[in-house]
């Protein structure tokens, strides 16, 4: 099946699943339905924030928040951004990332931004797979400022491990949102939320969900300046998917954990690097290369005439034609 046909098929499947996930469940049936789902996938209902009757749809249940204290925040270091299982953990090699044994892709393909990719080309990174049993919200691994969202259109293939092992560049071809953080002395951090078959949308606290942009099939960039502390929420998935988190080389020597190891939001996932030991320069300002790259893109691109969705005050959307993935 070629990419376009697979994209259409994946979108259609996700639309059907999304439609079902948003259908209201009769209140009296909600506890029974959600307990049955939890038993089937192994979800822990003891952590759920609200009474099960409060979740009107399966979609609401999938993105449930947890009780206070269910995910303690480690007192120091880099945090895990989500619940899941570590699929890959290592350092990028000249811009190359490992998807699975014998299958590579590049940072530039994943984030679709040459200036950002250059900064992350040799840094630590990890891929975390979220299954339907997991808590589906994604959190900040470090403190800083969220400076942009990039919605990148693509296919909606499954990201189950056996599929990832067999399909080239899947994580760089699926629909995704790149969340870029300016983490001060740690530089830029990219938290990439990768969509998958059955994932109705990716919800963002400071912008529209990915479903808003999907029909147009075009890249959208939202620039913002939102402060986040370690452990603050960055977004949420409908159903399971994958998160790829990437750092600049000077930020940390390595992330903790081994492939196949379960991990939870808020657990210590890495140490801030000792800059003096590494001989790395602490950047005083990390935006200039990104800003210059954006100016070049704006000059080269024609503005898109399609109606942009309404955004909160102070945010703007830029549209570019989707490149080949």
Image (cartoon, rainbow, N blue to C red):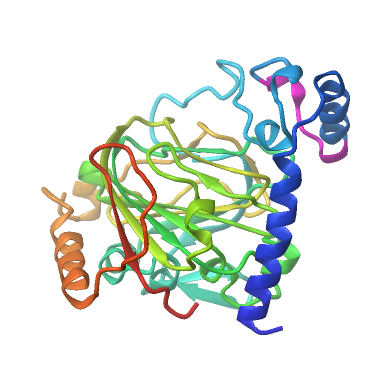
Place of residue 81 in the rendered image (x, y in percent of width and height, measured from the top left)? 49, 40
Return the residue nearer the eye: 283 or 212.
Answer: 212
Place of residue 132 in the rendered image (x, y in percent of width and height, measured from the top left)? 73, 44
Q: Which quadrant is the N terminus positioned in?
A: bottom right
In the rendered view, tell whether residue 130 sits above or below residue 31: below
- Camera sees residue 157: no
- Camera sees residue 307: yes
Return the residue nearer the eye: 45 or 183.
Answer: 45
* Residue ID at (25%, 54%): 278
* Residue ID at (49%, 52%): 212
Count of number-bearing discs: 0
Return the residue nearer the eye: 233 or 259.
Answer: 233
* Residue ID at (59%, 26%): 65
Left or right: 86, with 17 as reference point: left
**Highlighted magenta segment, given as a residue range:** 40-48
Left or right: 98, with 225 as reference point: right
Quadrant assignment, res 226:
top left
Quadrant assignment, res 83:
top right
* Residue ID at (26%, 37%): 313
Is 124 one of the magenta-colored residues?
no
Is 47 one of the magenta-colored residues?
yes
In the rendered view, tell whether residue 95 sits above or below residue 152: below
Left or right: 280, with 235 as reference point: left
In the rendered view, tell whether residue 251 sits above or below residue 66: below
Place of residue 164 in the rendered image (x, y in percent of width and height, measured from the top left)? 67, 67
């Amino acid at each position: 099946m070629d990419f376009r046909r697979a994209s259409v098929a994946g979108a259609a499947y996700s639309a059907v699943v999304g439609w079902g996930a948003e259908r209201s469940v009769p209140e009296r049936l909600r506890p029974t339905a959600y307990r049955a789902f939890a038993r089937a996938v192994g979800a822990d209902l003891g952590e759920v924030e609200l009474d099960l009757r409060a979740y009107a749809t399966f979609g609401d249940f999938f993105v449930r928040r947890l009780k206070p204290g269910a995910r303690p925040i480690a007192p120091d270091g880099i945090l895990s951004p989500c619940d899941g299982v570590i699929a890959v953990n290592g350092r990028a090699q000249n811009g190359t990332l490992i998807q699975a044994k014998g299958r590579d892709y590049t940072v530039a393909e994943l984030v679709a931004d040459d200036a950002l990719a250059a900064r992350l080309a040799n840094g630590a990174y990890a891929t975390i797979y979220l299954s339907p049993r997991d808590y589906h919200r994604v959190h900040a691994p470090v403190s800083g400022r969220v400076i942009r969202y990039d919605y990148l259109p693509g296919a909606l293939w499954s990201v189950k491990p056996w599929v990832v092992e067999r399909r080239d560049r899947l994580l760089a071809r699926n629909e995704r949102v790149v969340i870029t953080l300016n983490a001060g002395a740690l530089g830029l951090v990219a938290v990439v939320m990768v969509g998958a078959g059955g994932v109705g949308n990716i919800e963002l606290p400071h912008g529209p969900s990915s479903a808003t942009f999907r029909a147009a099939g075009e890249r959208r960039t939202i620039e913002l300046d939102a402060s986040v502390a370690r452990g603050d929420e960055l977004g949420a998935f409908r159903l399971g998917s994958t998160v790829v988190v990437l750092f600049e080389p000077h930020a940390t020597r390595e992330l903790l954990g081994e492939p196949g190891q379960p991990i939870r939001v808020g657990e210590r996932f890495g140490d801030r690097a000792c800059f003096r030991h590494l001989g790395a320069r602490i950047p005083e300002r990390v935006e200039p290369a990104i800003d210059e790259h954006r100016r070049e893109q704006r000059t080269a691109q024609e503005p898109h005439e399609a109606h942009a969705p309404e955004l909160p005050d102070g945010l703007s959307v830029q549209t570019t034609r989707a490149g080949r993935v």
